[in-house]
Amino acid sequence: MYPLIRLAKEVFLNRRRDRLALGETHVAYMRVRPWDIDVFLDLNNGRILTLMDLGRFGFFVRMGILKVLKEHGWYGTVAGSVVRYRRRITVFQRLELRTRVLGWDDRFTYFEQAFWRGPDCCAHSVVRTAITTGKGIVPSVEVAKSMGYGEISPPLPDWVADWAAAETKRSWPPER
């Protein structure tokens, strides 16, 4: 089940925090609960993605993205992600989740997220999102302008740009 209470907490706690500027990092603190673990007593890899989703909501509140989406009748969707898992995360551990915008291309915005436990990065991801309507994807430039940013994205790291380029070569739909 989706952690709706945790989602409400993230939105509530971040409503009064300082607004973030483009390029600034949002920090959220989370604790691993017994219902977040898998049969090996680790934080479930799918739950890591869900907790990162919650971290993006707190970030969206602080950036003012949710307000802009509501004003335009837009909604966001995850269009892809790449995750690297590096350290074991177990029940009751406290984690710091850091979220920031890396940049955008014509269609997608790229977010970097990382779970830290002290000096160790436990999991790192890049999530690409699209802003959509019932008629399709809203161009990133239009979204950036509505947020008060310029049309030009910060440069994406080479490896993120390479990943995005590789995704354009991936066949869709996949073979059966």
Image: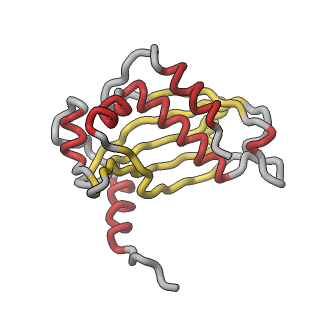
The residue under the point 37% across, 47% down is 110
The residue under the point 42% across, 77% down is 173
In the depicted structure, whether residue 101 falls above or below residue 170:
above
On the image, the x and y values in percent for residue 145 come to 18, 36
Q: Which quarter of the picture shows residue 60? A: top left
In the depicted structure, whether residue 12 falls above or below residue 171:
above
On the image, the x and y values in percent for residue 168 come to 33, 69
Q: Is residue 126 left or right of residue 49?
A: left
- Residue, far left: 151
On the image, the x and y values in percent for residue 122 come to 64, 43
On the image, the x and y values in percent for residue 143 come to 24, 41
Q: Nearer the viewer, residue 84 or 81?
A: 81
Q: Is residue 39 left or right of residue 107?
A: right
Q: Count the numbered circles shown.
A: 0
The colour scheme applied to this rendered structure is secondary structure
Q: Nearer the viewer, residue 122 or 135?
A: 135
Q: Nearer the viewer, residue 98 or 77?
A: 77
Instruction: Determine if residue 19 is in view.
Output: yes
Instruction: Determine if residue 119 is in view.
Output: no
In the depicted structure, whether residue 82 falls above or below residue 76:
below
The residue under the point 76% across, 36% down is 33
Q: Is residue 109 left or right of residue 35?
A: left
The residue under the point 53% across, 35% down is 55
